[in-house]
Amino acid sequence: MNDQPSCPKCGTAATPIMYGQPAASALEQAERGEIVLGGAALGQGSPRWACQSCGTQFGDIRPLFSSGPTN
């Protein structure tokens, strides 16, 4: 399943943003344009996707980390 969206500004295929300290493999992926490095800080409003053509960043990454109900 490919859930990769298009940029809402220019229509180019978006690239996922990876947060945290990147491993060597992630640095290589970033060099190839497969991911965009988002830095170590992940906060409210951090985008999930980046457009490498126009620079637009969009989508909320928080739903990927929802932990569900707590007991």
Image (cartoon, rainbow, N blue to C red):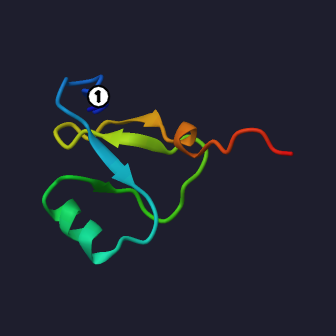
Question: What residue is rendered at 56% in x and 41% in y?
Answer: 62
Position above or below: 23 against 54: below
Q: Where is residue 8, by image quadrant? A: top left
Image coordinates of residue 67 in percent, x first then y, are: 67, 45
Asked which secondary structure carries label 1, the reply is loop
Image coordinates of residue 71 in percent, x first then y, are: 86, 45
Image-based side of 64 in relation to 3, left or right: right
Question: What residue is rendered at 55% in x and 40% in y?
Answer: 45
Q: Which one is in front, 69 or 65?
A: 69
Question: Total of numbered circles in the picture?
Answer: 1
Image-based side of 62 in relation to 6, left or right: right
Image coordinates of residue 60 in percent, x first then y, are: 50, 36
Name the residue tied to disc 1: 5
Can you say which quadrant of the picture contains the N terminus? top left
Q: Which one is in front, 52 or 13?
A: 13
Question: What residue is rendered at 59% in x and 51% in y?
Answer: 43
Q: Which one is in front, 64 or 49?
A: 64
Q: Residue furthest bottom?
A: 24
Q: Amino acid at mark 1?
A: Pro
Q: Residue furthest left?
A: 32
Number of residues whose C-alpha sits closer than 10 Å to that of mark 1, classed few (under 14), some (14–19) or many (20 or more): some
Position above or below: 10 against 56: above
